[in-house]
Image (cartoon, rainbow, N blue to C red):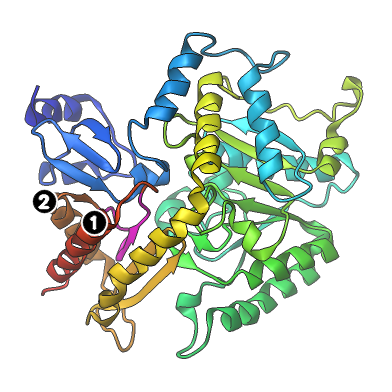
Amino acid sequence: MDNQALINRDLACVWHPCTQMKDHETLPLIPIKSGKGIWLEDFSGKRYIDAISSWWVNLFGHSNPRINKALYEQIATLEHVILAGFTHQPIIELSEQLIALTPDNLTHCFYADNGSAGVEVALKMSFHYWQNIGKPQKTKFVTLQDSYHGETLGALAVGDVALYKKIYAPLLMEAITAPSPAGCYAEQGESYESYARRQFSAMEQILHARHDEIAAVIVEPLVQCAGGMRMYHSIYLKLLRKACDHYGVHLIADEIAVGFGRTGTLFACEQAEITPDFLCLSKGLTGGYLPLSVVLTTNEIYQAFYDDYTKLTAFLHSHSYTGNPLACRAALATLAIFAEDNIINKNQSLAMMMQQAVEPLKEHPHVGEVRQQGMIVAIEMVQNKTTRQAYPWQQRRGLKVYQYGLEQGALLRPLGNVIYWMPPYVITPAEIAQLAQITQAAIDYATSD
């Protein structure tokens, strides 16, 4: 089998996600034969550094032997069972461990299949909670400018990236949008912390004026990933938790992309020392092996649904593959690697190496900002460095980075004009240096005219 034969077969029958399929008339697909560690290999033998962890899911490398072993053992025992009225050992163990690892007072786990589905669970559960306790007027959700929470209709409604959302506006509930606290918008010389504090006043005003109708605020803690890897100071989360408590509004923390060590701590909320009312997790939960998401919530919320069946207060939400044993076993193997290999501490040195590797790009004439939060690095290309004027989106400068990167053996999939690294945690210093060299050359190429 060769690359071209598979490309031809694929284009005859597969519709790819987040893709204008006409692009593939000139931009060849890359059929992947195998993966090992941070490397992907196609059918011609060419290798690519997976700098984005295959859409942010792969934590410990492709074909990880420890996760493989756990799955081999599980598949010989139980592949799946309905989770309504039944249970199994992997989901019990996983729930116990997640409750122990996440911020205090999160006591119950509700499972779904993917990140968007997890966000839907949190939104519905918050809304339903207020219905159950006699406050039916609380139906609104507050979100942040540049936020992204998924592609299903509820998750899309509480996002703020027009590229994904605008066309579907007639189908969506109306959310309340607060200004972004992201430091990339700060005034010259203004710190991320000062800007976050200043921006919080708008959120405070929204909650003060409309808390009687607001069910929850939903945020991506510390990093707004799909919105351009925009990062903000943890003080915003601390202020938000205090305000939500004061005004009687739920706080939903969408850590689907930033959980499991991406921001430097196991969970981003730890850096603000807060506990959300709902914590949404997915992506890295299974180490990049199988789809699984979980929403953790408090006993207070759980008890609002706990009653005689005839009261009709139950949360009647389900997915066929909810709590799949194979996915749960992969998640348990992932958590074991965190514990046994001291990953969070090891990532501190990797993050420092990543910071040093991209330091020269701060002086690049077409780089407006290099920003980093733990194991996430973002490099924003601009047309004018002094004014931070962006390149017109129609020029697709990021696509040029992507194409050049592939030619040189690296998977870099920019978000518009923002190039980012979110690599597996098994990346080596030599591989970081190689990735930096390719990234530098790709930016030079993409901004050369």
Nearer the observer: mark 1 or 2; the answer is 1
Does residue 433 sit above or below 387 in this rendering?
A: above
Quadrant for the C terminus, please: bottom left
Q: Is residue 350 left or right of residue 38?
A: right
- Residue 257 appears in the rendering: no
Quadrant for the N terminus, please: top left
Which residue is labeled 1 in the image?
A: 430
User: Which comes sooner in the sequence, label 1 or label 2?
Assistant: 2
Kindly indicate whether the residue at mark 2 contacts the one at mark 1 (C-beta within 8 angstroms). Answer: no
- Viewer-nearest residue: 16 or 224: 224
- Report how far apart the C-alphas of labels 1 and 2 lie in the structure: 19 Å
What amino acid does circle 2 point to? Glu
- Residue drawn at x 73%, y 73% as measured from the top left: 204
Whole-percent x, y for residue 65 in the image: 37, 28
- Residue drawn at x 46%, y 67% as measured from the top left: 230
Q: Is residue 83 left or right of residue 365?
A: right
Q: Within 10 Å of the Cα at label 1, are there few (<14), some (14-19), or many (20+) other Cα atoms?
A: few
Whole-percent x, y for residue 412 in the image: 26, 54
> In which image quadrant can residue 21 be found?
top left
Q: Secondary structure beneath disc 2?
A: helix
Does residue 317 sit above or below 160 in this rendering?
A: above
Whole-percent x, y for residue 274 in the image: 72, 60
Q: Which mark is residue 224?
A: none
Magenta stretch, main secondary structure, is loop
Whole-percent x, y for residue 176 in the image: 64, 62
Does residue 420 belong to the magenta stretch? yes
What amino acid does circle 1 point to? Ala
Which residue is labeled 2 in the image?
A: 407
- The residue segment tinted magenta is 412-423
